[in-house]
Amino acid sequence: MIVDLLIVLIAPALTLALVPLLQARAVDLGLIQVANARSSHDGARASGAGIVLALGATLSGLLLALVHNDPGLIAPVATIAALALVGFADDLFNLPVTQRLAAQLLAALLLVLLAGGWDWFVTLPIWIAAPVLIAMALAGGLWINLFNFMDGIDGIAASEMAFVLVGLMALAAMSAPPSSPIWLFAGAAALAAITFLIFNWQRARIFGGDAGAYFHAAAIFWVSLAAVMSGCVNPYATVLLPAAFLTDAGVTLGTRALRGKRVWEGHRSHAYQHLARKIGHARTVAVYLVYNLVWLLPLAALIQLDILPSLPGLVLAYFPAIVFVVRNKAGQSEYA
């Protein structure tokens, strides 16, 4: 128990120690993000700190695999770390979109297989297994991109990651004590994200960058899949927890597509960005956190405990979120 705790604490400790060092070297490394017309911040800020969070969580994950003699943890942790490295390379060099998408889809495919997808893939007819596997990988790639779209104001991405991972841990604990190293890794990643908020809360001194968004999204994706595949968390509950993020990103994307906008181009027309211009970054993140904690987590718990049917639970989660983001002009120009 003590050893596990010490290993888990490596991730936040490294975040606390190394993020200031990266911030100090940001100019030398070319990790400065200058504000433009599509930014929700002003001036120039350091970026790319997500690689530090990924480093800490990866080290914790590999040590947990060693201590618990669980080699099955190594490959997914390494895959998540590799995708974070791709994000960091994008922070440094602005990789072509084709390379980014290829890395995201490959990582998503591997994470599906490593979460338990391979076990049923080899037992089902290929004409059933292959389309399902491809669909899940595409869903993972879409999730990574949507999460990246939502990483546009101070503190929102790290707080969302912490909420979803801790929420999944709480749901798993309702069925049985989450003793698997997967949950210890989830705890390490969540603590790293919470620690990062020291530097990333309004007014942020440094951003997570694409390295952070890729790491956050991939970790959530794999832990969610592993939780469902192992049978310890209701699959509908895993879709419910990130409802605020998915709704804002999805409605914004759909609205921009219907208005003939280039959906792949940068913008600042998400509902959270409109709201942040009115009430500030910190208050906007607080609004999303309150919705997560006061509404989404209890709904997920009711579904997990079989008190609330899954489909009505999803409606109760997503309908208010849709109303909220539409009222806050998701996908519309800030001048509309």
Image (cartoon, rainbow, N blue to C red):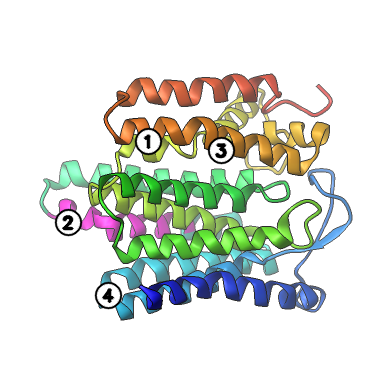
How far, Cα to Cα, is label 2 from label 3? 30 Å
Q: Residue at x 54, y 36 (%)?
A: 292
Find disc 2 in the rendering and name its residue.
Answer: 119
Whichever of callouts 2 and 3 sits on the residue coming sooner in the sequence is: 2
Quadrant in the picture for residue 30 = bottom right
Circle 4: is it few (<14), some (14-19), or many (20+) Cα within 10 Å? few
Whichever of callouts 1 and 4 sits on the residue coming sooner in the sequence is: 4
Amino acid type of the residue tagged 3 in the rendering: Phe
Foreground mark, 1 or 3?
A: 1
Whichever of callouts 1 and 2 sits on the residue coming sooner in the sequence is: 2
Find disc 3 in the rendering and name its residue.
Answer: 245
Q: Is residue 226 visible?
A: yes
How far, Cα to Cα, is label 4 from label 3? 32 Å
Q: Position of residue 196 (x, y in %)?
A: 65, 62
Find disc 1 in the rendering and name its residue.
Answer: 301
Label 4 element class:
helix
Q: Position of residue 169 (x, y in %)?
A: 39, 51
Circle 2: is it few (<14), some (14-19), or many (20+) Cα within 10 Å? few
- Point out the image quarter for the C terminus: top right
In this rendering, position of residue 184 left or right of residue 329: left
Q: Residue at x 86, y 60 (%)?
A: 44
Foreground mark, 1 or 2?
A: 1
